[in-house]
Image (tube, rainbow, N blue to C red):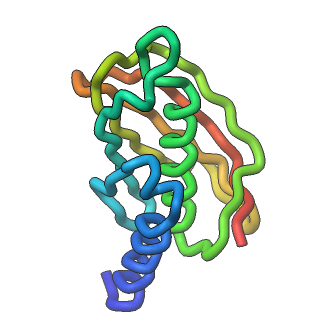
């Protein structure tokens, strides 16, 4: 990987890791490469819903952030979620989660992306697809 790409990815990392939402949520970057992103979210009691499991909005926020970071890793300086569909497969109770994203299809101005969320036992707990506007 050339120095320009390395610097670009470092800028993407810094953009995300210094954002107010990232800091609030407590996300951690596990992997950031061109076209490959993995994020980790340590468990916090504040994520629990009334059932004592991690709230679905937390699932969706992690998945959306992972896919947005993935789109940025491909060289788009500005990305925006246009549409997002999430399937909740399993509840998570008092566990950390991690996510991975991949590109399904990309055009000049949009990307169709998928992301998967896993619990500490490596079980998929949510699956998501989304369309992103790329600039």
- The picture places residue 41, in percent across and down from the top left corner, at 34, 41
Q: Residue at x 66, y 71 (%)?
A: 78
Q: Which quadrant would residue 37 be assigned to in this image?
A: bottom left
Q: Which quadrant would residue 125 be assigned to in this image?
A: top left
* Residue reaching furthest to the left: 121
Q: Residue at x 51, y 34 (%)?
A: 58
- The picture places residue 47, in percent across and down from the top left corner, at 44, 30
In the rendered image of this protein, does residue 44 appear above or below residue 53?
below
Q: Which quadrant would residue 99 be assigned to in this image?
A: top left
Q: Quadrant of the C terminus?
A: bottom right
Q: Residue at x 39, y 56 (%)?
A: 36
Q: Residue at x 37, y 49 (%)?
A: 26
In the rendered image of this protein, does residue 72 appear above or below residue 31?
below
- The picture places residue 74, in percent across and down from the top left corner, at 52, 68
In the rendered image of this protein, does residue 15 appear above or below residue 31?
below
Out of 52 and 8, give the one closest to the viewer.
Answer: 52
């Amino acid at each position: 990987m050339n120095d320009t790409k390395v610097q670009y990815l470092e800028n993407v990392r810094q953009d995300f890791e210094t954002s107010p939402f990232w800091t609030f949520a407590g996300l951690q970057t596990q992997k950031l490469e061109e076209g490959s992103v993995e994020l980790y979210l340590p468990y916090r009691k504040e994520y629990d819903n009334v059932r004592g499991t991690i709230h679905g909005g937390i699932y969706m926020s992690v998945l959306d952030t992972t896919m947005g970071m993935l789109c940025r890793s491909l060289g788009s300086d500005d990305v925006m979620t246009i549409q997002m569909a999430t399937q909740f497969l399993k509840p998570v109770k008092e566990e950390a989660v991690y996510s991975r994203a991949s590109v399904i299809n990309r055009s000049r101005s949009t990307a169709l992306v998928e992301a998967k969320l896993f619990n500490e036992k490596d079980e998929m707990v949510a699956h998501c697809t989304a369309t992103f506007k790329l600039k």
